[in-house]
């Protein structure tokens, strides 16, 4: 039984506070230096008064590192030990309130300031699991508390904090739940329009793309070939706005030709060419092409910098919910 399974059990029913990787009936005490370096931190006992999974998760987060001393550099600087325990810790994040995550992370990083190499290792591992594309734990929202702590720690100088400060600034833009930042673009006919004045259906998929981008072409094909995606477009439940960021009207003599030329956008997609203010003012951070945002009808961000598979999964859930409610 793994530690993550034990964590979930403790959240739901409590009473199980064991170290990971060992069947319950074979639990043994860990001793010796070699074992201590590979051991996982024990889960703290949760008070019986905390009944809900969210309250239990919040308590576990707050006390997860209680038995860890960052002055113990044999552990705190050991990549394997720190990585396994951080993964166990991060597995709690989806079950805890946002404010509990923030408080727990800030406390953890403050304690880690006792040893700079350990602090940098922890920061590196947090980025690996919460920021790296393809990580099963990737979540910008979960990464933000780490970035806030790192960007303001007195342990690092301004040069060392430049990257986390940039990442934090990017993470705080267009967060899920907020209204997407408005920007101007030009339609294929050369008309001026803004995101907020763009009519949209139940959901609006905003795609920033480059006409010469192979990955963009693959993404367009993947979405266009999806049965539900096409059906929602047909039924007026989905609007797609594809914004060409490669050629602004100032650099493209014929902006009306640019949006569809490179990637053959489907005719039921809306096309536009970005105004230079979009990139000049860094209204959106575009880490790769294409960059996808899923918005609701009021332009609130549902998904930020999403993979096409995540968009399709979200739309499938939306479709099921509408079917259940008879909409």
Image (tube, rainbow, N blue to C red):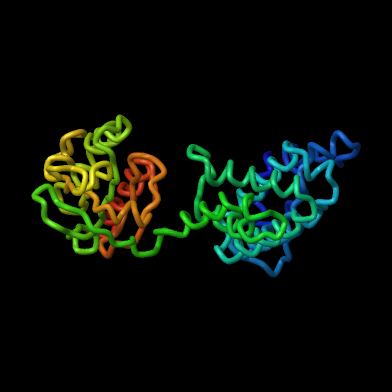
Is residue 157 among what the camera can see? yes
Drawn side of residue 253 relative to residue 196, left or right = left
Exactly how many numbered labels are in the figure? 0
Is residue 12 among what the camera can see? no
Residue 81 lies in what quarter of the image? Answer: top right
- The image shows residue 182, relative to residue 267, as above or below, that is below
Which one is nearer the viewer's eye here, 130 or 57?
130
- The image shows residue 310, relative to residue 326, as above or below, that is above
Q: Residue at x 77, y 39 (%)?
A: 78
Q: Position of residue 27 (x, y in %)?
A: 81, 40
Residue 79 lies in what quarter of the image? Answer: top right
Q: Position of residue 244 (x, y in %)?
A: 24, 44
Q: Residue at x 90, y 39 (%)?
A: 31
Which one is nearer the viewer's eye here, 249 or 34?
249
Residue occupying the far right of the picture: 32
Specify the quadrant that holds the C terminus. Answer: bottom left
Specify the quadrant that holds the N terminus. Answer: top right
């Amino acid at each position: 039984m793994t530690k993550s399974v034990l964590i979930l059990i403790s959240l739901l029913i409590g009473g199980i506070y064991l170290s990971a990787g060992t069947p319950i009936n074979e639990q043994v005490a860990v001793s010796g230096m070699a074992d201590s370096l590979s051991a996982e931190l024990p889960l703290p006992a949760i008070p019986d008064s905390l009944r809900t999974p969210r309250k239990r998760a919040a308590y576990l987060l707050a006390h997860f590192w209680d038995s860890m001393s960052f002055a113990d550099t044999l552990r705190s600087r050991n990549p394997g030990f720190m990585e396994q325990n951080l993964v166990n810790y991060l597995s709690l994040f989806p079950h805890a309130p946002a404010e509990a995550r923030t408080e727990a992370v800030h406390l953890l990083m403050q304690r880690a300031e006792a040893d700079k190499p350990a602090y940098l290792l922890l920061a590196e591992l947090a980025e690996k699991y919460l920021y790296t594309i393809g990580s099963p734990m990737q979540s910008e929202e979960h990464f933000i508390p780490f970035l806030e702590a790192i960007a303001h720690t007195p342990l690092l100088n301004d040069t060392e904090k430049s990257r986390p400060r940039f990442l934090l600034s990017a993470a705080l833009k267009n967060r899920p739940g907020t209204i997407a930042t408005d920007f101007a673009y030009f339609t294929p006919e050369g008309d001026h329009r803004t995101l907020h004045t763009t009519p949209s259906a139940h959901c609006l998929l905003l795609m920033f793309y480059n006409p010469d981008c192979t990955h963009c072409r693959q993404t367009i094909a993947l979405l266009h070939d999806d049965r539900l995606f096409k059906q929602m477009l047909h039924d007026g439940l989905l609007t797609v706005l594809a914004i060409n960021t490669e050629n602004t009207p100032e650099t493209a003599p014929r902006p009306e030709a640019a949006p569809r030329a490179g990637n053959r956008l489907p005719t039921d997609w809306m096309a536009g060419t970005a105004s230079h203010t979009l990139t000049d003012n860094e209204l959106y951070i575009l880490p790769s092409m294409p960059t996808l945002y899923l918005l609701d009808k009021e332009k609130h961000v549902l998904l930020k910098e999403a993979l096409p598979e995540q968009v399709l999964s979200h739309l499938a859930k939306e479709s099921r919910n509408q079917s259940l409610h008879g909409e």
